[in-house]
Image (cartoon, rainbow, N blue to C red):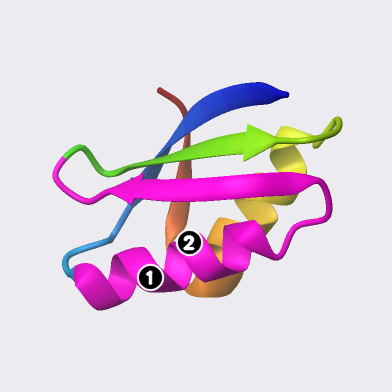
Amino acid sequence: MSTETYLVEGMTCGHCAGSVEREVRAVPGVASAIVDLAAKTVTVTTASVVEGESIAAAIAEAGYAFAGRA
């Protein structure tokens, strides 16, 4: 397992956080995704290799901006 933390721009509430978590968890290979709304991050634990581009695409699908690794 591997864990990475990514910066997310545009989240302002619990609904935002939930949307990001749901989209990122749907990426194949992702075991968990936990948003820290105050820090504007999502911490992703993967069970297999997952490219950062897949995480960025999931964040964009949720309607927010991927801002790189934390």
Taking the image as shown, residue 23 lies to the left or right of residue 63, namely right
The magenta stretch is: 14-38
> Which residue was labeled with disc 2?
21
How crowded pointer 1 is (Cα within 10 Å; few <14, some 14-19, many 20+) is rated as some
Comparing 48 with 60, the one in front is 48
How crowded pointer 2 is (Cα within 10 Å; few <14, some 14-19, many 20+) is rated as many
Residue drawn at x 85%, y 30% is: 49
Q: Quadrant of the N terminus?
A: top right
> Which residue was labeled with disc 1?
18
Q: Amino acid at mark 2?
A: Glu
Residue drawn at x 17%, y 65% is: 12
Comparing 31 with 39, the one in front is 31
- The secondary element bearing badge 1 is classed as helix
Q: Is mark 1 in CB contact (under 8 Å) with mark 2?
A: yes
**Residue 55: % across, % down:** 65, 47
Give the spatial CA distance, label 1 vs label 2: 5 Å
Taking the image as shown, residue 11 lies to the left or right of residue 31, namely left
- Magenta region includes residue 28: yes
